[in-house]
Amino acid sequence: MKWNWFKCLDKSLRTKMLVMFVLLTVFPLVFIGFISYSKSSNIVAERAYSLAQIKTSQITREIDVLFQDIYRFNEIGKQQSTVQFLLREEVTNEDAREILSLFDFYKKVTSQVSTYLI
């Protein structure tokens, strides 16, 4: 036995109005809701991806700066006079000049690395 929709609509005004309400309101609302959801989820996914890219580049820059600082401090630590100066309590004029020359070296290395990054 086949189901006949037109036969169902012939029954009562209440049934006709209910079917028309469902057809004219619920289905379009569900369709618009589905489209809105899919577009919104795509936008959220794109923004999350772009924010992840930005955060990754920031972390990469921070790691690069950290390694540059490690390199600079390593270069300072290679100078025996600096280590001796830091371990001694008495300071002489010659030690201070040597430390100042080491800081000049540090500035030179820093400027070279910063021009390399740009």
Image (cartoon, grey):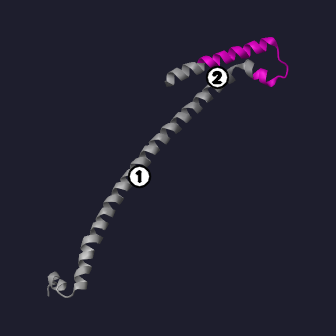
The residue closer to the viewer here, 19 or 96, is 19
Q: Which residues are magenta?
A: 83-108
- Where residue 62 sits: x, y (%)? 56, 35
Q: Nearer the viewer, mark 1 or mark 2?
A: 1
Residue at 50% across, 22% down: 116
Left or right? Give the position of 1 relative to 32. left
- Where residue 108 sits: x, y (%)? 60, 16
> Which residue is the extreme one toward the right?
90
- Where residue 113 sits: x, y (%)? 55, 22
Q: Quadrant of residue 29?
A: bottom left
> Which residue is the extreme one toward the front?
13
Residue at 50% across, 25% down: 117
In the rendered view, tell whether residue 88 sits above or below residue 46: above
Image quadrant occupied by the N terminus = bottom left
Q: Which residue is mark 1?
A: 44
Q: Which residue is mark 2?
A: 75
Residue at 45% across, 42% down: 53
- Where residue 78 sits: x, y (%)? 67, 22
Kind of element beneath mark 2: helix
Q: Is residue 98 located in the magenta-colored stretch of the structure?
A: yes
